[in-house]
Image: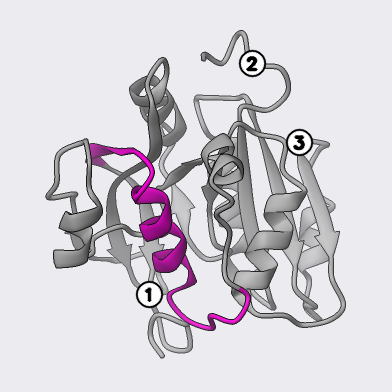
Amino acid sequence: MTQQNSIGPFVSVIMNCYNGDKYLREAIDSVYAQSYENWEIIIFDNGSIDNTAQIANLYDSKLKYHYYEKKVTLAEARQMAFSYSKGEWLAILDQDDLWYPEKLMIQINAIKNSDYILCYAGIHEIDATGKLIRENLPRYKSGEMFEKQLFQWEINNVTPLINSKALKEHNISYEPSITGLEAYNLYMKLMLKGKVCTIQSVLGAWRIYPGTATDK
């Protein structure tokens, strides 16, 4: 299915936020800078007391802001954000990461008219200032991938596109009791059900700095 014949947003960009306003505008702006335009942003604010709401209100109706007063686990927050989405594909972009302008266009062109259920690409790891730490590209070719990822996990959480229909058909969701590696659990269950598309290009940046969940 292409951008032109999709009804409503083809991609829902899920941004889970908690007191992360420092880099939030850069993350949001990287979505608005996409050459592919058929998307929506779902911001799920998990009880922030910073300027997240004020920043979200600076944008147009393509960005939908949802505030949840009760702090919940990231797995619960991601699943609740999913419930607000309308896209046929779901993308995760955390509040301190960013995409490069051709990210969505390249991936949409790779998955259209296919039976892929997941698509991911390479990333740059950057520090708090945006300085490059290293580059990571997928080592695996597109196709069946469950056993390979069991041997060596390599899926980042910046570039994946997730097939919403596949999640619903196979009743796959984030496990609320998981407080770490919630994405690993979801992706592994999904990869049991279909093929994965890999893009041998860097399409986004993953920010690593003291205090992040990755750092901890």
Mark carried by residue 62? 3
Count every numbered label the image shows and give the total. Answer: 3
Q: Nearer the viewer, mark 2 or mark 1?
A: 2
Mark toward the start of the polypeptide (1 vs 3): 3
Determine crowd level at label 2: few under 14, some 14-19, many 20+ residues with C-alpha closer than 10 A.
few
Where is residue 86, by image quadrant?
Answer: top right
Q: Is residue 3 above or below residue 161?
A: above
Q: CA distance from mark 1 to mark 3?
A: 28 Å
Where is residue 119, by image quadrant?
Answer: top left
Residue in the image at 58% along x and 35% along y: 165
Mark carried by residue 208? 1
Q: CA distance from mark 2 to mark 1?
A: 35 Å
Residue at mark 2: 6
Mark toward the start of the polypeptide (2 vs 1): 2
Q: Mark 1 belongs to which amino acid? A: Ile
Residue 162 visible in the snapshot? yes
Q: Helix, strand, or loop for circle 2?
A: loop
Q: Which of the two residues, 49 or 196, is positioned nearer the viewer here? A: 196
Residue in the image at 60% along x and 31% along y: 88
The scheme the figure's colours follow is: one colour
The region drawn magenta spans 176-201
Q: CA distance from mark 2 to mark 3?
A: 16 Å
**Residue 211, x across and y down, in percent:** 48, 88
Q: Which of the two residues, 110 or 118, is positioned nearer the viewer here? A: 118
Residue 152 visible in the snapshot? no
Q: Helix, strand, or loop for circle 3?
A: loop
Residues under numbered marks 2 and 3 in contact, where contact means CB atoms less than 8 Å apart: no
Mark carried by residue 69? none
